[in-house]
Every structure is written in structure tokens, then in C-alpha cells.
Image: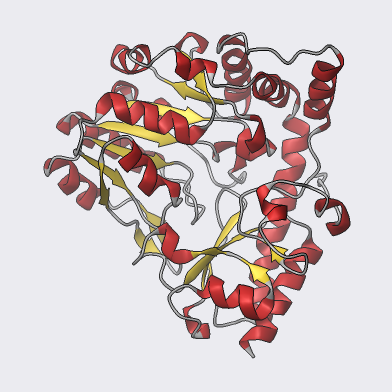
Amino acid sequence: MHRIAADPLDVLRTRTSAKWRMFDPDVLPLPVAEMDYPLAEPVAEALHAAIRRSDTGYNSGSLPVAEAFAGFAAERLGWSPDPQRVTCTADVSMGIVEVLRRVVAPGEGVVICPPIYPPFFDLVTEAGGTVVAVPLAGGIDEGWSLDLDRLEAAFAAGARAMVLCNPHNPVGLVPARDQLATLADLAARHGATIVSDEVHGPLSQPESKYTPFLTVSDAAREHGVAVTAATKAFNLAGLKAAMILTASERGDAVRAAMPYEVEWRMSQFGSIATVAAFRHGGHWLDGVLASIDDNRRLLADLLADDLPGVRFRMPQATYLAWLDLSALGWGDDPAVVALERARVALAGGPGFGADAGRGHARLNLACSPEVLAEAIARLADAAG
């Protein structure tokens, strides 16, 4: 399998995105979910071609992106979404909020499963809902899973929706198909809606079968809405394009109730880049997955050798590593100490849920092996 090599640090430090502008030049920045790999050539060429023809107007609607994704999903994800049942918008977070606004009344409960991508807490409240935290079951040693008993209790107590992270950020869990099917049944039983963030789906490793929620069952299609994008798999976060997908009349009504402006928020460059990525970026993505696989295995070896007290479970998907740093004695938010003492920037665990994230931090694996090794060496030196 071919690999995609990360750009060297001197090139990366010329980037002006958040990852490379939030910290001093002596810091290795590994908190933000941006890749260090060069842009896929078909995407770069599509954007250059758009500039050459001055194609910088408004996007022409959802269908080009939806059709490109349908082909990609059928080929790689075992999913055949209907392009007519797609509404595009600027990004996944915005899509989640717009769906929640349609399915949750002010103050009603929305379930999330810590440790979880920190913006989920704010997306629920932005949409007018109340966060209902149902932590993942299990842990680093035995692996994680959805806590279906507690999820059922939350729906029975009145939660009207759940924001599912499939695959899960930060732990890299790919939920099992049978768990997703049971979750869909619970939603049907209690009249709830599952809003499934599937942006990391294309980043599942070959041995971990990612299951798109809308493919699971009739109950999932009836009570689910998926939100996804090319942004994580192809490193396009700055180009602003995402999709809201449905597979039932109930779901279609959710999209139909959205203001027309939701669709206009997708950028023209986001649309162009997304179509190029889904139609022509598969070879590049395969190389990225191989490089991430190498790095997750390298990280396991580095920790075993240099920081044996740090606990880590290789992610089944994403390019993110969830680290239990409690043994280092660096407090509730060890990322603060890592930055101060080691000049390594990590995403602080408490932001992913005060209890579930205590003593933890998230590390970005989508970098060069050399950067990863240097980061662990610095952390080991700081740990004494």
C-alpha cells in the first residue's frame, strides 16, 4: 500500500490555518484536527482551475455534491444515499444545529456521549436544547461502546434527540451495526431523532467496518438524519461544504422545513473541492489511511517504550488518539502541563466532558512519524 508523506515542518509552518497560528513556533501543534499531508492533487487542480476561470460566484445547489458523494459512498462505504434527499450547508456543525432546531423544542433534552467532540455541548444549546450526557460504556482497556441501557433511560425520561458521533471523536470507536440497530429501535419506540455525525466515516481502518446509520434498518431511516462532509477525510475544513441526508418522508420534512439560506451557506470552492475529492480522491485517501495506520501503531510502540504509564487504545477510525495521562500526575487537564513543560500542544481532555475527560488529552496522528516521535520524546522528558 502506498503512503502519503506529511509536508516537512518548515513548509507546514508557512500555513496560516488555526493549527499553525495558535501556538509559538517552538511548539509541536497536535490538538487541532487538521492533517499535515499535502492536498490531494485532484482537489488542488480543481481549485486552481476554478481560479483560472474566475469561478468564484455562488454555489449552484446541492445536487453536484450529492451525486458525487452517492458514487463515493456506494463504492467505499456500502451506502447508496439518494442525491435528491440531500441538503448542503457550510459545515457539519451547522447542519447538526439546523436539524436539531427542527426536531427539538426549546429546553428539550438532546443526548450526547462523552468523551465527545467539545462543540457538541454548544451545538445542543445553540439549537435551544438541553444537554443530556450519557457517557460511553467501557474504556481504554476493554474498548468503548454505546451504553444502550442508559440511552433508553434518557429517551424514556424525555430526551427528544441524540447527536451520535459515528465514528466517534475522540476515542476512534466505530459503533457495531447491532448497537446502531438497537439505538434506532429505541429512537422509534420513544419518538426521538438520531442526528448522526458521520464526517469521520471514510477514515475508518479496513479491519473496522463503519456502518452508516441510515443503512442500518427501516427504523434508522425513519428516525435518523445523517450529516457528513469531505472535510475530515480530505482536509477541506476551510472550504465549507457539508451535507444533510435523509432516507424517509419524516426525515425529508426536517430538511424541507429549513430556511432556503441553509443551502446557500455552502461555498463555491467547497462544492468544487468536495466533488473532486469524492470523484477522484480515492487513491490519495488510501495512502492517507495507510500513513495513519502506521502512525497509530508507531504511537503504541513509542508509548510502551517511553511513557509506559500512559494508556492508549488504537483508534478504529479517525486520525485522533485519546490518551489517559493520569499516571503522570499532571492534573485534570494534562494538556496544560504538556504545553508548558514539553512544548507539545494537545487538546485538553476536560473539554470533551468534565468527568470523562479528566486526566486525558487528544493527540492528532495525521503528521509525520518524525513529528510524532519528537512529541512523545518531549512528553517523556517532561515526565522525568
In this rendering, position of residue 224 left or right of residue 152: right
The residue drawn where x is 34% and y is 56% is 136
* Rendered view: 331 above or below 254: below
Quadrant housing the N terminus: top right
- Give the colour scheme of this rendering: secondary structure
Q: Position of residue 175 (x, y in %)?
A: 42, 45
Q: Position of residue 59 (x, y in %)?
A: 63, 13
The residue drawn where x is 35% and y is 13% is 252
Q: Position of residue 149 (x, y in %)?
A: 21, 51
Question: Can residue 379 be seen from the camera position used here?
Answer: no
* Rendered view: 205 above or below 343: above
The residue drawn where x is 59% and y is 82% is 308
In this rendering, position of residue 202 left or right of residue 301: left
Relative depth, front residue between 376 and 90? 90
Relative depth, front residue between 187 and 211? 187
Determine which quarter of the picture holds residue 202: top right
In this rendering, position of residue 378 left or right of residue 64: right
Question: Can residue 147 be seen from the camera position used here?
Answer: yes
Quadrant housing the C terminus: bottom right
Determine which quarter of the picture holds residue 248: top left
Determine which quarter of the picture holds residue 299: bottom right
Q: Position of residue 376 (x, y in %)?
A: 69, 74
The residue drawn where x is 51% and y is 76% is 325
Relative depth, front residue between 342 and 177? 342
Tally the marks.
Answer: 0
Q: Residue furthest bottom?
A: 384
